[in-house]
Image (cartoon, rainbow, N blue to C red):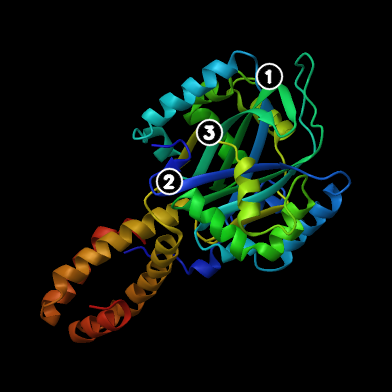
Amino acid sequence: MSADVAGQASALTVLTPIAPGREIELRMYLESLRTRPSPLKQLRRTHFGRFVVVPDLVAEGERGPDHLTSPQLLFTACLDGDLDSYLDELCDALAPEAQEIWGRCEGCPEPAQGAALKAYLADHRIRTGFFVAAYPGATVSEVTDAVDQRERLIAFAQDAQDMDPKTLQREFHRRFGN
Amino acid sequence: MAIAQDPSARPLTATGTDARNVDGQAICITVFSAVRWWGRAVLPAVFFIARRRRGDTTNLAKLAFIHFARWSLIRRLPGQTLRHPLLFFESNFNGGWEEYIDAFSRILTTGMKWFWGSSYGFPKPLPTGPFKDYIRRHELVASHFHCAYPQATTKIVLSALELDRELRAFRGRTRDMAPDAFAAEWKAFLGRVERSL
């Protein structure tokens, strides 16, 4: 099994160099996403996703420490299924945001969308060494449905405390199906 | 029977980190560290062994607050050859940042030596104080972090999935039952799933 995979889940890691002079505006754009629903919500296979600006590397006493020749943009996602079709969805559904994000990176195609963007992101993908998931078999929709169902069941268990058997059975089937 | 409180009233547990690293109950950690020359050979072997032992979840089960985590070895960047390769680590978890590092250090002590032992400046997992300082020096703040189910902790997700399995079985078992038998089975069901509620 690929190191990018745990159960049905995959790990995507992409590092792209930010174009000279565009680091601050990119950071401001990404931070502004907090004020509205995350664009990653449109990618319904995304459990977790993040954008991180890497301005430089931190030295720890090594001889000849490395410094980035340009700041990098890190994008990672924990997602359902395979990376290839996820990148297709990302390059399609996220086209307006992709222009704002990777459009500020060196070498990104213009416009930042479709097959050209997919190829760019795939070229800058970092392979995973070890990926671990607490619930590797569960998709995003399975998790959200199960969490919602648990909350409904807790509410029902409280409501049902004084129900007679007939009402209990009828109400259970009404709320949770047969 | 003890039933959890209304989830909308659940206190947020994500503490000890920048607000940009938080989405609901979830926290992200992003860390890069420079690796010594011998890490180029050792880390791929560590990853290989970790993947082979992934089924042994004894210690990870104790770290029941981690949703997903990953490690990568980065040898080169676009247009730049690195003198020292980089170890990239990210985690998506819930709870407090301090408690996370404490638990990570105490439970995965040996594993952490394997993963970070080749990184420059790594101070050993224990005591946790120097290790926390090390992570803080190397951690990056996310500009944007997204969780698809921000109000659910790992424990809630695992409980909900377990509950779903139990509920499917309960539905199948009770489909044609008379009301009195259904009520008795419901009571037994609640007793069985109490830990998941």
Residue at the spot 54% in from the left edge and 16% down from the top edge: B41
Residue B189 placement (x, y as % from top left):
22, 65
Residue at the spot 85% in from the left edge and 54% down from the top edge: A25
Q: CA distance from mark 2 to mark 1?
A: 29 Å
Q: Which residue is mark 2?
A: A134
Q: Is residue B144 left or right of residue B54?
A: right
Q: Which residue is mark 3?
A: B104
Give the chain letter at badge 2: A
The quadrant in which residue A133 appears is: top left
The crowd level at tag 1 (other Cα within 10 Å; few <14, some 14-19, many 20+) is: some
Residue at the spot 59% in from the left edge and 17% down from the top edge: B39
* Tags 2 and 1 on a common chain: no
Q: Is residue B80 above or below residue A89?
A: above
Residue A156 placement (x, y as % from top left):
34, 76
Q: Is residue B97 left or right of residue A30?
A: left
Residue kind at label 1, given as amino acid type:
Tyr
* 1 vs 3, front mark: 1
The crowd level at tag 3 (other Cα within 10 Å; few <14, some 14-19, many 20+) is: some
Q: Which residue is mark 1?
A: B120
Residue B60 placement (x, y as % from top left):
43, 37
**Quick check: can you spot residue A43?**
yes
Report helix, strand or loop for mark 2.
loop
Q: CA distance from mark 1 to mark 3?
A: 19 Å
**Residue A39 or residue B161, whichever sits in front:** A39
